[in-house]
Amino acid sequence: MVVFKTTSDLAFYLKNKKAEGIKIGFVPTMGALHSGHISLVNRAKADGLFSICSIFLNPTQFNDKKDFEKYPVTTNEDIALLLEADCDVLFLPQVSEIYPDGTENTKTYDFGYLDTILEGANRPGHFKGVGQVVGRLLEIVQPDTLYLGQKDYQQCMVISKLKQVMGLDELNIAICATMREADGLAMSSRNRRLTEPNRTLAAIIYQCLVSIQAKRDVASFAVVKKECFDLMNRKGFETEYVALADASTMDLLDEYEPGRQMVALIAAKLGEIRLIDNILL
Ligand code: AMP
């Protein structure tokens, strides 16, 4: 695995590689890697692409300063995992490489409706930061395929819109299945900050999603939603939303709609840790 810390070195290397005709599969991350991240690298390799992973803890997408300061940084372990996965390139830039003109002077994008609901509404400025960093990374890496995790469903929709807005018609976006712990908890870098009792409780989020999915043809979503809210809050979660949306437009739905591809999404805090997850139905 070749590691690059500067944009210019990476760009020079990739220019030569592209001249050889290789196709690039890109996996952007914020580090503290786990099997979910590695599954994206594996998928890029399985698709026969030259795999590039970036680790960049993007300051502009954290609406909560404490969350940023406490975000786990485990670079040595990350490198070991990427080596084991036989990742081809790691891009490990400093903030000044991604935002050479300063964060205020780096292009941002408007995601309209998508930025007004759920994660957009609950984390003001978050998607602006996501668009800013992914926009920059796409300019630098110019991948053929971008690998994203379904775990961050709304983010996948935002990045699909970014592709449109940036006019990247040739870019493929591969949305990959959420990797889970044995009890169903979606793997996340933030999980390692959960206390032991909260780590056990955290699996309830997935149990709620499964029940929302299982009851789609036999119950009212309003009732199931209330059951989930009540259960989670009783167990000590601070539940932000339990929502149902159209899977492609993200239009929020009050009720299950037969024949419609939908996604159920939950965000909740356990102690200081904010967790999100979703399921297709
Ligand atoms: P992050 O480092 O949290 O910004 O995530 C980097 C990429 O990994 C994003 O595309 C995430 O959606 C994806 N990802 C995070 N957790 C998982 C998971 N449990 N399974 C699959 N992909 C994931």
Image (cartoon, helix red, strand yellow):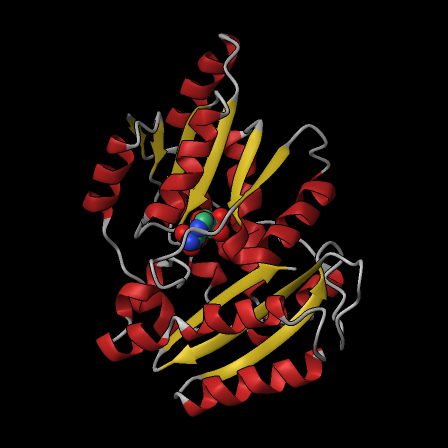
Residue drawn at x 66%, y 85% as measured from the top left = 223
Residue 86 lies, with reference to residue 264, above or below; the image says above
Residue drawn at x 46%, y 89% as measured from the top left = 233
Instruction: Name the residue at the top extreme.
Output: 20
Residue 77 lies, with reference to residue 212, above or below; the image says above
Instruction: Specify whether residue 180 is in view.
Output: yes
In the figure, residue 216 lies in which quadrant? bottom right
In the figure, residue 123 lies in which quadrant? bottom right
On-image quarter of the N terminus: top left
Q: Position of residue 253 (x, y in %)?
A: 76, 72
Instruction: Specify whether residue 55 is in view.
Output: no
Residue drawn at x 40%, y 26% as measured from the top left = 10
Residue 260 placement, left or right of 3: right
Question: In front: 32, or 201?
Answer: 201
Q: Position of residue 242 (x, y in %)?
A: 59, 77
Q: How many marks?
A: 0
Residue 130 lies, with reference to residue 62, above or below; the image says above
Question: In front: 9, or 245?
Answer: 245
Residue 87 placement, left or right of 226: left
